[in-house]
Structure formats: C-alpha cells, structure tokens
Image: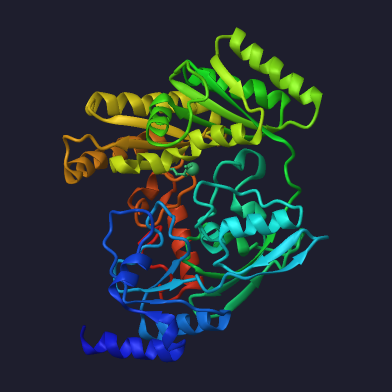
C-alpha cells in the first residue's frame, strides 16, 4: 500500500472513529460485494457508521478527497449494485439497526437503514401488525437496501413493492446534506415527491439513513394452492379465473425442472405425485366458508377445463410452509450449478408468448442448456436461470451466456418489457439499460444525479456511467 491510501485511511478514521473503519482483507472481500460473483472486490476501506452525523462525515470526507462511496446493506442483491471494484469506501449500515417511534394510530415505525427485513416483520407481529414485503432473503436483507433497490418479492400482487411502504425518508445526498422527505404523511401534494427518486435509486443520489415504514393488518388464515398445469396458457387461465373471484396474496409459478431440483436437494416433499411441466402457487386469506367454497369451485372448474392436471390445497401451517418451500428454495438450491441469472418482466398477458420465444432461441442455439423458469408470474416477472452444463468451463459458459443476454434483451425490447423487474441495474445490467429506457430518459437521469451528487461520488458507475 502506498502512502496516499495510508494517509487517507488515517484521515478517514479521524473523520469517523478508528474502530469504525476496517481494512483487513477478509472485510474488504466480504463487504466489497453482494450475491453476484462476477466482479472482484477491491474497496479501499469499509466504514461502519453508527449515526446520521457519521454518514455525513464520511460523505464530506469522500467529497473532499474525490473518492467513490458504495452503500452496503445485507449484500443479498443480484445486480452488483453493492459491489466495490475500484478503490471505493464501502459504507455498511450494520451498526444502524434500531427500530423506534412506533405509532399505532398512524401504523408507522421508524427504521434505521441496517434493520433486517425479518426484524421489522417480527416487530410488526409483536404489535399485531404486518410488514408485507417478503422474499427468500428476508433473514439478511436490510431495509435501507430494500428501499434503495425497491425490492419486490412474493407478495407484490397484493401489497406492491417496497416503494408502497415508505412514508418518510431521511437521506444524505452527495454533498453531505441531510434531506427529510415526506415525514410520514399520507397526503402531501406539494410538488415533486423527491422521496421516490431515492427509492430504487441504488444509492446513486444519496444514502438512506432513516425510513418511516407503514404497517398493515396481518393476513388471516393464509392458505395456499399448488396446481400442476400442462402449459403456460393454462397458468394464465388459472390466474384469470382466480383473480376474478378471490383477492390473492400471491401468484407464483415454477417449472418441473425447478421443483425436481428442490425435491432432490432439500428436505422438501413433492406435494403431489403427478409431475406437470409448470406449477402455479396461489395464496389467499381463507376467512370464511364462502371463500373456501369459491376456491374449491374454481379448482374444480380449472380441472374440468384441463388447465389443471393435479393440485393440492394446504390444510395446516406446516403444509402451507411446505408448499412455499417448493418455491422459495429454488434460487438457493440451483446455486450449485453456477447458474446464469436474469430477472425480466412484461405485461402479464404476454408472459406465455414471451417465455416461449426465449425458450425457442436458447434451445435452438444451445440445446445443452437447461433452463429453470420460476417467478412472480402474477406481476409478469420471470426469473430465468440457466444451469451450467458440466461439460463447460465457467468461462465458456459465461461467454455463451453473454449471447443469451443479448437475445433475451432483444425479445424484452420487442415486448416493451423491462430488463430488470425487481433486482435493479447495478453494474450487471447498465450496458443493457437502453433496451428498456430511452436515451432521453437516461440523459434526464444523469441530470438528476448531478443535482444530488455533483461530484459523482455516490455509488459511481451503477445504473449508468
Ligand atoms: O435467483 C433468482 O433468480 C431470483 C431470486 C428471487 O428474486 C426469487 O424470487 O426467488
Ligand atoms: Zn424474485
């Protein structure tokens, strides 16, 4: 290490506190990346601030020294947004985990950015309330990161994305200024809602240092149905039939390839014997006999129409959990095949055609590739994963997958879809942003960044260059 970084680190320690700066190589590796594995972490240092003032001090320090800052939450992101590859200072929020100011009338609660999603869910439960944004990584993802990436997950069809639950934000911009946005109000029509720019902004405009989150009533007697379908058109017909009569809390799908891997590699039981190409997983609040009867009628109707070949409805919490495990364990289970990943969306009605086009091109060009489809089909959000064949080295596989990305994004563009439905852009997708956003839009985004971050120090190089 030359003198400059050493001196810089000393100055950084003075700006915050020595104990809050880490420079050992394990920490640099650990905090320098998220769940993506395509970039080599190379941060200058890690800072763990414990107050808003310390975050401001770090930003001012970075501005003075023209060093990039990368925010880091639970590091469960899948788009390399919280990755530091270029001598940046990583600002990790692990020491800012307090939940406070619960208000039962407003049904709001104030969270520091490092609050773990599950911590907020448990807090809400203790107050007989519910924080509904949920996903497989809730045990480690942090609220600040969820907001910065506008995290979605498995209940979006009913409850929306993280954006819908943020009623107030405090942010530190690239000048070190603290902005207090919206103060928990339900109604506030006083011009531009700046809060929304920071939600999903991936830390490129400023860092979230506090959030006022809304809670809601807990769902009652959640019950799930897993239905086996012959094809994607069947899945769409099931969605249409159920949505017409039942308020669904989830509508997920996955393929037989996905289910068989989960059953083979975890303790999860196959819910029924008949394998079918696709499965729909529906959830609803089973609160009356009338609802239960309606669901059973719909189930029978779907079987009569041939949309459903077999299916099962949960009769207990453990059965509900087993059905959810079939879906939630997919991502983790397939990690061992070093999968190529993509997260894309189109309007719901176009999903079957869209999926078939991608299947066709990949099967034609690379017949040795095994595609694992799953996702939040009720939101038009597909997770495309391709397992690395044993015969290919990781390098060869990645090279071929670059072609896959191009074909996939061309199809996304043709369908006026999104190249990133819920995982964000980060480093991973910035080169493809024009498939979903116009040059004019990207120019405006660059202009907005300049306003909040004139020196370009806040998560530089993410979303766009
Ligand atoms: O691993 C993936 O491709 C998706 C991860 C996550 O968004 C999910 O829905 O399980
Ligand atoms: Zn997802």
Name the image quarter holding residue 209. bottom right
Quadrant (top left/top right/bottom left/bottom right) for the C terminus: bottom left
> What percent of the width, then of the height, locates residue 457?
40, 74
Q: Residue at x 39, y 53 (%)?
A: 79
Name the image quarter holding residue 26. bottom left
Locate ligand 1 by image quadrant.
top left
> What percent of the width, then of the height, locates residue 94?
50, 70
Q: Residue at x 28, y 85 (%)?
A: 5
Give the tally of numbered discs: 0
Left or right, 107 with respect to 256, comes to right
> What percent of the width, then of the height, locates residue 424?
45, 52
Above-or-below relation of 222 to 148: above
Out of 231 and 219, give the one closest to the viewer: 219
Q: Residue furthest right?
A: 105
Q: Residue at x 39, y 49 (%)?
A: 433
Q: Residue furthest top?
A: 304
Name the image quarter holding residue 348. top right
Out of 98 and 251, give the one closest to the viewer: 98
Left or right, 409 with respect to 209, comes to left
Q: Residue at x 36, y 81 (%)?
A: 66
> What percent of the width, then of the height, locates residue 407?
31, 35
Above-or-below relation of 175 to 144: below
- According to the image, what is the colour scheme of the structure? rainbow
Left or right, 61 with respect to 336, comes to right
Out of 330 and 381, give the one closest to the viewer: 330
């Amino acid at each position: 290490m030359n003198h400059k970084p050493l001196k810089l680190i000393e100055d950084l320690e003075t700006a915050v506190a020595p104990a809050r700066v880490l420079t050992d190589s394990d920490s640099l590796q650990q905090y320098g990346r998220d769940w993506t594995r395509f970039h080599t972490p190379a941060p200058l240092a890690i800072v763990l601030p414990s107050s808003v003032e310390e975050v401001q001090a770090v930003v001012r320090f970075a501005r003075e020294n023209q060093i990039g800052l990368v925010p880091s939450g639970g590091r469960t992101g899948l788009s390399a947004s919280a990755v530091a590859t270029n001598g940046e200072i990583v600002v990790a929020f692990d020491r800012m985990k307090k939940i406070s100011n619960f208000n039962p009338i407003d049904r709001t609660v104030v969270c520091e950015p490092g609050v773990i999603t599950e911590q907020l869910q448990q807090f809400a439960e203790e107050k007989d309330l519910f924080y509904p944004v949920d996903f497989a990584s809730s045990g480690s993802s942090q609220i600040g990161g969820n907001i910065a990436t506008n995290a979605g997950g498995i209940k979006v069809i009913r409850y929306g994305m993280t954006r819908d639950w943020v009623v107030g934000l405090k942010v530190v911009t690239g000048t070190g200024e603290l902005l207090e946005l919206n103060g928990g109000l339900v109604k506030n029509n006083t011009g531009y809602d700046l809060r929304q720019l920071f939600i999903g902004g991936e830390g490129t405009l400023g860092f979230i240092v506090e959030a006022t989150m809304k809670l809601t009533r807990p769902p009652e007697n959640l019950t799930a149905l897993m239905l086996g379908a012959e094809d994607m058109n069947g899945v769409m017909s099931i969605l249409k039939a159920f949505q017409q009569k039942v308020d669904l809390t989830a509508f997920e799908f996955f393929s037989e390839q996905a289910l068989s891997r989960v059953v083979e590699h975890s303790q999860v039981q196959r819910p029924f014997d008949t394998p079918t190409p696709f499965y729909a997983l529906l959830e609803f609040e089973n609160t009356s006999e009338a609802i239960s009867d309606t669901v059973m009628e719909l189930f029978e109707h779907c079987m009569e129409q041939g949309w459903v070949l077999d299916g099962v409805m949960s009769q207990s919490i453990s059965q509900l959990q087993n059905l959810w495990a079939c879906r939630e364990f997919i991502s983790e289970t397939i990690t061992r095949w070093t999968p190529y990943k993509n997260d894309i969306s189109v309007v719901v009605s176009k999903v079957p055609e869209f999926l078939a086009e991608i299947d066709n091109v990949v099967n034609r060009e690379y017949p040795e590739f095994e595609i694992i489809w799953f996702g939040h089909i009720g939101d038009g959000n597909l997770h495309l994963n391709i397992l690395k064949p044993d015969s290919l080295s990781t390098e060869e596989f990645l090279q071929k997958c670059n072609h896959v990305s191009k074909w996939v994004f061309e199809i996304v563009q043709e369908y006026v879809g999104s190249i990133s439905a819920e995982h964000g852009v980060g480093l991973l997708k910035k080169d493809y942003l024009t498939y979903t956003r116009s040059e004019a839009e990207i120019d405006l985004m660059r202009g907005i960044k300049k306003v909040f971050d004139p020196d370009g120090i806040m998560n530089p190089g993410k979303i766009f260059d």
